[in-house]
Image: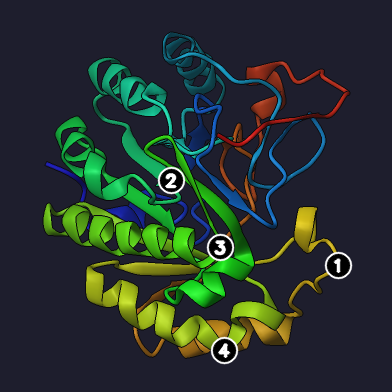
Amino acid sequence: MSNTYEDLQHSHPCFGGHKKNAGRIHLPVSPGCNIACRFCDRVINDTEERPGVTSKVITPEESLEVLDKALALCPEITVAGIAGPGDTLASDYALETFRLVKEKYPSLIQCMSTNGLLLYEKAEEIIDVGIDSLTVTVNAVEPEIEAQLNKYIIFHGKRYEGVEGARILIENQLKGIRKIADAGITVKVNTVLVPEINASHIPEIARQVKEAGAKIYNIIPLIPQAELKDCQAPVCAEIDRARTEASEYIDVFRHCQHCRADAAGVPGESEYGDKIYQRRIVGKETFSHG
C-alpha cells in the first residue's frame, strides 16, 4: 500500500516543506531523455546545483551500494528518488532500480519524476512496482504554449516537432496523471515558470492537473540556459503571483531547492552527495536527447 498524501506531508521533504528529520537521496540511473525542453542543459559535473546535473550515472545494482553508504552517513533519509539526469521512463533503469530498492529497503518511500511522455502506457508497470509518489513536469496544457518550451519529442522511435509533439506530450501527461492518481498514488506536478511564455497560463495548468488527480503543485523558476538563455528568470513577485493564482485550484509547494539529480541529505540542512558519489569530475559533458 502506497503512502497517502497526508503521510507524505510528514515524511517527504518535497511534500511537507522543510523537515529536519526527512532526508532524500536521488539515484542518477536514467541517462537518456525523449523530449527536448528548450531550457534544459543536462550535464555531468560536480559544481552546478540544479536539476539535470549529476557527477555520474550509476546502474540499478550500484544504487544499492550507494544507498548503503547514504543511510550510514545520513540515517534521516526517508526517500529514495529518481529524477534523472534523463527521463525515468525513457529507459527501464529507474523501474528496475525501484524493484531492487523495494526488496532491500522496503521502508523507504519511493519517489519518481518524469516528463510524462510515456506515463500513460507505463502506468501499470509503475503501479505494480509500488511507487509512493510521482512527479510529472507539465509546463503547459495548450500545445501552442508547450511548443515554445519544448522543441520536439521522440515517441515510439519517431521525432515529432513543435505543436504536433506538444499535443502528444500533453495528452499523455494528463491521461497518465489520471491513471496513476486513480490507483491511489500521490501525484505532484512541477511547472517551470517562464514569465514571457507561460506565466498567464499557470492557473489553467493548475486547474487541469488537479482535475486529472494531482494533489500538489510546484512552480519552479526558470534558470535561463540553453535555447532560453536570453529569457528573464522570474523575480520573487512573479513567482509569488503564480503560486497564489495556482493555489485557487490546488495545494502549492513553496520550498523547492532545485536539487541535483544526485542530491543526498536533508534539504537545507545537510548534503552528502559529494561523499556518496565521490564528485571529482571537473569537465562538462552534455547528454544527448533521443
Please name whichever residue, 123 or 169, is drawn nearer the observer in this view of the structure.
169
On the image, numbered disc 4 is attached to which residue?
200
**Which quadrant would residue 99 be assigned to in this image?**
top left
On the image, numbered disc 3 is attached to which residue?
162
Q: Earlier in the sequence, mark 2 or mark 3?
A: 2
Q: Earlier in the sequence, mark 1 or mark 4?
A: 4
Q: Which residue type carries mark 3?
A: Gly
Q: Which residue type carries mark 4?
A: Ser
Could you classify mark 4 by the number of other residues whose Cα lies within 10 Å: few (under 14), some (14-19), or many (20 or more)? some
Q: Nearer the observer, disc 1 or disc 3?
A: 3
Q: Secondary structure at mark 1?
A: loop
**Which quadrant would residue 281 be assigned to in this image?**
top right
The residue lying at 39 percent from left, 28 percent from top is: 94
CB contact under 8 Å: marks 2 and 1? no
Residue 113, how many percent across, how many down?
43, 46
Q: Which residue type carries mark 1?
A: Asp
Please name whichever residue, 268 or 15, is drawn nearer the observer in this view of the structure.
15
Q: Secondary structure at mark 4?
A: helix
Q: Secondary structure at mark 2?
A: strand
- Residue 230 got which mark? 1
CB contact under 8 Å: marks 2 and 3? no
Residue 68, how many percent across, how many down?
46, 13
Residue 138, how many percent across, how many down?
45, 64
On the image, numbered disc 2 is attached to which residue?
113
Q: Earlier in the sequence, mark 1 or mark 3?
A: 3
Q: In this rendering, is residue 47 above or below 106?
A: below
Residue 93, how many percent across, how many down?
40, 22
